[in-house]
Amino acid sequence: MTVPALTAETRWRCTLCGNLTRFDVTRTARVTEFLHFDLAGESEVEETEVLSETIESVRCRWCNAVDQVELVARPGAEGTEAPAEQG
Ligand SMILES: [Zn+2]
């Protein structure tokens, strides 16, 4: 099973236990970082540009299921089943 890609309107949900919030994500990313060094030689990443990114696996922190996630709508996104707030 492949991991579905997240979008602005969707989030992951573990299909086994319903977890929405905690996942261990293993990914390969190619990034360019802007390292800013201070005079002592300590560096801090001030900017990160992701050139390419591949999610290899997603493990649920609750039940340890691997790659058992589906996409569901985020609250407030179009098509969500959550009741709309009134007023
Ligand atoms: Zn789970």
Image (spheres, helix red, strand yellow):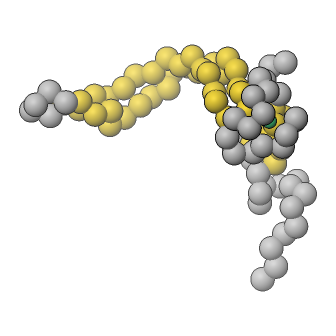
Residue that protrudes farthest toward the front in the picture? 63
> Whole-percent x and y of residue 26?
62, 21
Foreground pick, 64 / 57? 64
At 78% across and 43% down in the image, what residue appears? 19
Question: Which corner quadrant of the image does residue 4 belong to?
Answer: top right
In which quadrant of this rendering is ligand 1 seen?
A: top right
Is residue 51 among what the camera can see? Answer: yes
In the image, residue 60 sits, relative to residue 76, either above or below, namely above
* Left or right placement of residue 59 versus residue 44 in this view: right
Query: From the image, which quarter does the N terminus lie in?
Result: top right
Residue 61's x, y, as percent? 69, 35
Residue 81 left/right relative to 31: right
Camera-side residue of 19 and 33: 19
* Snapshot quadrant of residue 75: bottom right
Q: Which residue is drawn at 41% across and 31% down?
A: 48
Residue drawn at (53%, 19%), measured in percent from left and top? Answer: 29
Total labels drawn: 0
Q: Can residue 6 be seen in this snapshot?
A: no
Pinpoint residue 16: horizontal percent, then vertical percent: 88, 35
Residue 50 image offset from top left, x and y in percent = 50, 26
User: What is the quadrant of residue 20 in the picture?
Assistant: top right
Residue lying at 40% horizontally and 22% vertically, measured from the top left: 32
Q: In this view, does 41 lie above or below 8?
A: above
